[in-house]
Image (cartoon, rainbow, N blue to C red):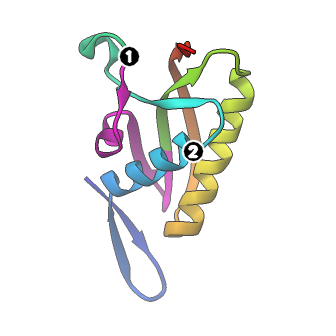
């Protein structure tokens, strides 16, 4: 599936995997994020951290009226304030998609799939 944008200069087609990878890489750079998790946690078992090439398994991208909706499934670090981490991720993903692709986001929904305890 791909995202179709219409501008005054023509049409742009962006694969949803590109948007998912960009959104995932923006999310994991935020403080308190351990990594991305699979959106099919019950089917896949325990929430495991996805690698960069598999970010699309933890992100759902949908389009409506030249705007996108992003659903992120993440794993947070133990001891962080989850509401602040989620807000920072939402802001960072919106900013990154707007700056890199010129894509406006209608919403960024965060689903916490797990909490990781560091083994220091």
Compared to residue 75, the image places residue 18 above or below, namely: below
Indicate whether residue 56 is drawn in magenta.
yes
With 9 as the anchor, is 41 left or right in this view?
A: left
Tell me where residue 70 appears, x and y as whole percent.
49, 43
Tell me where residue 31 appears, x and y as whole percent.
66, 36
Q: What distance separates the C-alpha of mark 2 from that of mark 1? A: 19 Å
Region rendered in magenta: 48-69
Tell me where residue 81 appears, x and y as whole percent.
74, 21
Q: Residue furthest bottom?
A: 9
Picture residue at 68% right of the left edge, 47% below the top: 91
Q: Residue furthest front?
A: 120
Quadrant of the image occupied by residue 87:
top right
Tell me the number on the disc at residue 24: none
Picture residue at 64% right of the left edge, 49% below the top: 92
Tell me the number on the disc at residue 29: 2
Residue position for label 1: 47
Q: Nearer the viewer, residue 53 or 69?
A: 53
- Badge 1: how crowded within 10 Å, few (<14), some, or many (20+)? many
Q: Secondary structure at mark 1?
A: loop
With 108 as the anchor, is 83 left or right in this view?
A: right
């Amino acid at each position: 599936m791909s995202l179709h944008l219409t501008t005054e200069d023509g049409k742009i087609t962006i694969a949803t995997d590109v948007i998912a990878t960009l959104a995932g890489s923006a999310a994991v750079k935020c403080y308190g994020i351990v990594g991305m998790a699979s959106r099919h946690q019950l089917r896949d078992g325990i929430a495991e951290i996805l690698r960069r090439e598999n970010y699309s398994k933890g992100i759902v991208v949908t389009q409506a009226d030249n705007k996108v909706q992003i659903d992120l499934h993440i794993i947070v670090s133990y001891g962080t304030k989850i509401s602040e981490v989620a807000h920072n991720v939402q802001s960072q993903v919106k900013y990154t998609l707007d700056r890199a692709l010129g894509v406006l986001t209608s919403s960024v929904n965060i689903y916490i799939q797990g909490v990781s305890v560091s083994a220091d």
